[in-house]
Amino acid sequence: MRFQLSFLVFVGAATAITLNDICTSTYAQLALPAPGFYQGITIDSDSVVTTLASNYSVKDNTFFPNAAISYCNVTFAYTHDGRNDVVHVAYFVPDPSTFTNRFLATGGGGLAINSGLNTVSGGVSIGAVSGLTDGGFGSFNTQEDVHFLLANGSVNWENAYMFGYQAIHEMTVLGKEFARNVMGMQNATKLYAYYQGCSEGGREGWSQVQRFEELDGASIGAPAFRYAHQQIQHLYSNVVEKTLDYFPPPCELTAIVNATIAFCDPLDGKTDGVVSRTDLCKLRFNINSTIGTPYYCAASAGGGGFGPPGSGQPTPVQNGTVSAKAVAVAQTIIDGLHDLQGRRAYVSYQPSATFADAQTKYNNATGKWELSISGLGGEFVTRYIQLQNTSTLASLEGVTYDTLRDWIYDLWQMYEDSFQTTWPDLTKFQAAGGKVLHFHGESDNSIPAASSARYWESVRSVMYPALDYNTSTTKLQDFYRFFLVPGAGHCGANAGQPNGAWPQTSMTQLIDWVEKGVAPDTLNATVALGANKGQNQQICMFPLRPLYTGNGTEQQCVYDQESIDTWHYDLNSWKMPVY
């Protein structure tokens, strides 16, 4: 039964509340958005469940410092009128004594629309009511692809739009109202709304920034936007290996990466095991110099050098010297996808990123290394293009670089309005006062760092076409600031470059920008691995690049046109602009 009590009565009784007061079904039901608050949505008040947690430890969180928190997890369900569906949302409510008039929306990763307790717990640690959604996929642990097809050949388009942007938006709008109600906020009191997410969660964050004006600020890492290009990109390394007919042992590719890091590390003026200037690396490193480099990897129970220990098939000792064939594979991958006419179709990973997509598997029967098709890339062919209820692409027989280009085109056309997420005109978000901190690990091996650089450039050129580069950059930085994180991998620190720092407190800097007007010229970052763990570093704001003087002791953020130019690509395989 839907409660019809007057909201004014609730507010009047909501003074001096405690977390124990909040964490009852009755109180939580009274705090639900009123009937008709969100047109087309009906909340089921009988679905409310509350769970109290005390002294939960936020520890080793990629995006939030360590903290001890107490919270009430309030979950409830709603339906879309006329759709006969069920969507679950969860809001983690901090102790009222620690509430800071903030709401945090969160996203997921891969094909998941939420990150579980990981991100919302961090939100509680900054005094925010923090929300997540199941997207209507059946449970908080169900991924989007499970119900993407109604049957072979028939797309569940409501599922696609919920995953694309709608579910996060609804969770945010409902959550902001719920936060105000549950904390008894007066109408004149400002509730600051934020978003935090990385990878797929980063794409979900941009889906909100590009479409809506609900957020005051968004902290977005390594977004998986330009979805068609990004997902097929995962297959590119496999097709390179197949085309060149060489399937390198993972240890051989690791040797190439390590040699790249060794050469390119000091190009920024500091030798610390971190490639801070992958742009200079592209300009100055000759990958052919790695031919003949010896490599050795002990036998493994699994993992092939890229996966976690014990995963996959057992591998034998890998021992030899880097071959010309392996270097050709590596160089072609770094060069990026070109069609058979030589026109560029997409960007690729920066030198110093590991060749994760090129992972091969060992065939014990033949004693040879063989092709291992990317599961993520493969699923976007079988399920999202061919509309078959399978995630396995059995073969790449007959697949060429032109095939990859055509698959990108098909995905791009089919999901331009749901998954692609590359709208470059952020005028409405800017006019509403929103701020974005966007960062990307420069050695990301899953989503190319150049993908984020291209989007930043698209926004700059679309929003300020009449201004010169420096003036338009300054205007853009009034509300949107982008940072390349030296040495970092995908959404976190990189074991291959452990001395690189990660911006764990980006949300704190975003809050200072939104609430205090303190715009970050650099991102605070902390070394999370290795002997220098805990060391503080500063990340330069793009397009400035780090350069060290004084024998590596003094960092500057410098303008280097030659370096900037390496981040700009002419994707001339397409007639349509690729934002």
Image (spheres, rainbow, N blue to C red):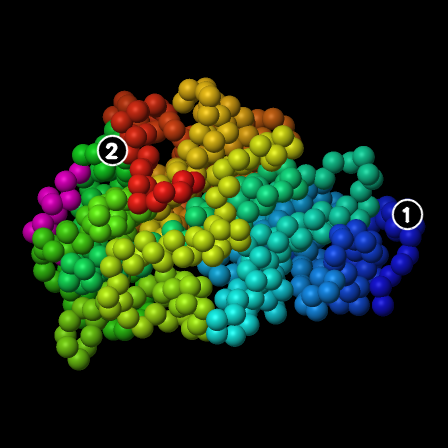
Residue shown at the point (30%, 30%) measured from the top left: 565
| Quarter of the rendering containing residue 343 | top left
Residue 211: x and y in percent read 59, 43
How dense is the environment of label 2, judged by Cα within 10 Å: few (below 14), some, or many (20 and up)? Answer: some
Instruction: Give x and y (percent) for residue 93.
Output: 70, 53
Residue at left offset 53%, top offset 56%: 108
Q: Which residue is mark 1?
A: 8
**Above or below, 548 relative to 40:** above
The residue that appears at 30% across and 45% down in the rendered structure is 573
- Extreme bottom residue here? 365
Q: CA distance from mark 1 to mark 2?
A: 62 Å
In the image shown, does 131 or 163 lie closer to the viewer? 163
Front residue of this view, candidates 158 and 133: 158
Q: Is residue 256 left or right of residue 97?
A: left
Left-right relation of 469 to 182: left
Q: Are marks 1 and 2 in contact (CB under 8 Å)?
A: no
In this rendering, is residue 59 above or below 521?
below
Percent coordinates x, y for residue 357 in the rendering? 30, 58
| x and y, in percent, of residue 516 in the image | 63, 28
Q: Which residue is mark 2?
A: 280
Would you place residue 493 above or below residue 363 in this image? above
The residue sitting at the left extreme is 292
Question: Which numbered dot is residue 178?
Answer: none
Under mark 1, the amino acid is Leu
Task: Locate the N terminus and report the quarter of the image it occupies.
Answer: bottom right
Instruction: Please tell me whether mark 2 sits on a helix, a strand or a loop.
Output: helix
Residue toward you, 178 or 528: 178
Residue situated in front as seen by the camera: 482 or 237: 237
For marks 1 and 2, the one nearer the N-term is 1
Q: Is residue 316 above or below residue 343?
A: below
Q: Which residues are magenta?
A: 285-295
- Let me know if residue 55 appears in the view: yes
